[in-house]
Image: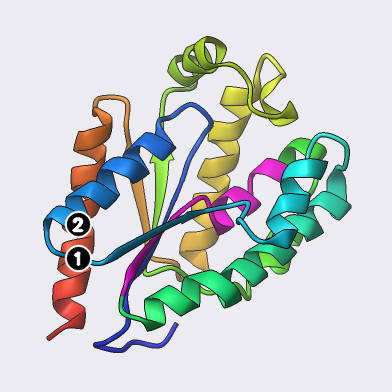
Amino acid sequence: MPSSNNRGLFVSVDGPSAAGKSTIVEHLAQLLVARGEEIYVTAEPSSGPIGKLCRELTETVSGYALACLYAADRYYHVDREIRVHTDAGRTVISDRYVPSGLVMQRFDGLDLSFLWQLNERADQPDLAVILQADPTVIARHLVERGAHNRFQLSPDSSQAEVDFYREATECLTRAGYHVLPLNVDDKRPEQAAAVIAERLMTLLALQRM
């Protein structure tokens, strides 16, 4: 993504199910607004027509078809929503992005290299936060919360997802992504959000020099 003093930053937040991702995004947005930043919060699947299809079909479509559908939504999301707001000078926070695209379809047996090829032309965020957590802890949280989709139903899904995110982190780092791995085992959501906010404020300061 081109650098510009007038362009807003783009940060994605991904991580294993029940690691507290959405709560962290909420706290992060509040912290940045309190510091005077103009913020736009979004999520994937997007609120657009392809994102709606993703939500409708996740339980009944699998493998390559679902991976391609999610990738199509991601490119649509970038073009119709994310770039619109960063170009307007807002900092965009996306709850899930490419890292999740390299993880969730692994549960359907797809290869990481294929998933990367499918997603590699999506705009790189200025900061890709990937949450890390103890799989036994998030498995307990998942049971308490309940599964949100079929990927979370198997008994070992938390361990598998943690492993997939570790491999995705390595893949994205090799591809030149600015990745912030963030262990949340010993952090409350507001503490994790504060770590991300500090990194973003540093990036914003550098951008505005």
Does residue 119 appear to the left or right of 87 in the view shown?
A: right
- In the rendered view, would you say 178 is above or below 12? below
Is residue 113 visible in the rendered image? The answer is no
Quadrant (top left/top right/bottom left/bottom right) for the C terminus = bottom left
Is residue 33 visible in the rendered image? The answer is yes
Name the mark on residue 177. none
Q: Residue at x 47, y 78 (%)?
A: 84
For marks 1 and 2, give the CA distance.
5 Å
Q: Nearer the viewer, residue 36 or 5?
A: 36
Q: Residue at x 59, y 33 (%)?
A: 161
Q: Which residue is labeled 1 in the image?
A: 37
Quadrant (top left/top right/bottom left/bottom right) for the N terminus = bottom left
Name the mark on residue 33. 2
Residues rendered magenta in the picture: 90-105
The amino acid sitting under disc 2 is Val
Q: Are marks 1 and 2 in contact (CB under 8 Å)?
A: yes
Q: Residue at x 33, y 43 (%)?
A: 26
Return the x and y of residue 164 as percentages of the image width and height. 60, 40
Return the x and y of residue 171 as percentages of the image width and height. 56, 58
Q: Mark 2 falls on what kind of element?
A: helix
Query: Mark 1 packing: few (<14 Cα in 10 Å), some, or many (20+)?
Result: some
